Image (cartoon, rainbow, N blue to C red):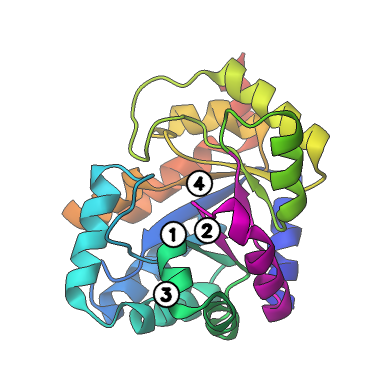
Amino acid sequence: MATADSLHSLLTQPRCALGVFVPAGLHPPHVERLHLDQIARAGASLFEVGLAHHDAGLDGPVIKAAYRRALRRGNLLDHTLRTVEHAAGLRPTVVMTYWEPVSRHGPEHLARLFAVAGAAGVMVVDLPDHQAARWQAAAKDAGLHAPRLVPRHSTGTDLARVAAEASGWLYAPASTAPTGYNGPLDISALADFTEHLRAASPLPVVSGVGISTPALAARVAPLVDAVVIGTPIVRTLTTDPDQAPALTAAFAQALTPSTFTETRA
């Protein structure tokens, strides 16, 4: 599938890519499309579109509030599909979701819907172990990648199992806290973890969660194939959307090789 191929090409290029997380339904569709256009032009090379969920246990207060706002708008799945369709016309796009809506709509059905909308993949952040094989098969049949979030505590056979069940990329959280964490990052621990992931799988490694500033993005960039920003952008889209392009550009600039080399030195 062309969208899956474009995602692979993006994540295997030498430069660290910038992914931007946008929850579908935060704004009316025509406003949301404008925001996606602006963020893409400002430097995003990958979109992650969040399918809102009422029990987003891995997310912090900013994204949870955005999800509640999206849920109040109603017609959530249709809105998310339209958001994915527009985002995928701009940049490779991956859907981020929890297992409950996947189970409720049916893994095979939902995978086909997102594939038709143009998604390159779908990452189920809390995928139950006993459903992994079914989801992997559903995604593959639809022509989607199925990235996996790998908990930091994963080692040995657990890490190897999750890596074997993934396609597209492995997601290495930069922090063990929920999304929205804005404290310091243990870069050495993240470096060790990404080394373990690369030893376990040839898949690209993507990092997010806690990459709250461009300076932190610059420190993480040499370790991974893409950095994803979520809460900083969602907060801006909620409170002052006109600033979202400038914030995206600041993170994109931080991922240029000269910038993160200087930051590491």
Disc 3 residue crowd, few under 14, some 14–19, many 20+, Cα 10 Å? few
**Rendered position, 177 above or below 84:** above
Nearest-to-viewer mark from 4 and 2 = 2
Q: Quadrant of the C terminus?
A: top right
Q: Earlier in the sequence, mark 1 or mark 2?
A: 1
Q: Earlier in the sequence, mark 4 or mark 2?
A: 2
Q: Which residues are magenta?
A: 122-150
Disc 2 residue crowd, few under 14, some 14–19, many 20+, Cα 10 Å? many
Spatial CA span between label 4 and label 2 = 16 Å
Q: The disc labelled 2 sits on which kind of residue? A: Val
Q: Earlier in the sequence, mark 3 or mark 1?
A: 1
Q: The disc labelled 4 sits on which kind of residue? A: Val
Residue highlighted by disc 2:
124
Residue highlighted by disc 3:
104
Q: Quadrant of the N terminus?
A: bottom right
| Residue placed most toward the observer, 46 or 171 | 171
Q: Earlier in the sequence, mark 4 or mark 3?
A: 3
Q: Is residue 240 visible?
A: no
Residue highlighted by disc 1:
98
Q: Is residue 61 visible?
A: yes
Nearest-to-viewer mark from 3 and 2 = 3
Q: Which dot marks residue 228?
A: 4
Nearest-to-viewer mark from 1 and 4 = 1
Q: Could you say whether the residue bearing mark 1 is in a helix, strand or loop?
A: loop
Check the image and name the residue furthest to the top.
265
Disc 1 vs disc 2: Cβ atoms closer than 8 Å?
yes
Q: Earlier in the sequence, mark 1 or mark 4?
A: 1
Q: The disc labelled 1 sits on which kind of residue? A: Tyr
Spatial CA span between label 4 and label 3 = 27 Å
Residue drawn at 78 percent across, 36 percent down: 198
**Rendered position, 58 above or below 174:** below
Q: Give percent across and percent down for residue 24.
A: 35, 69
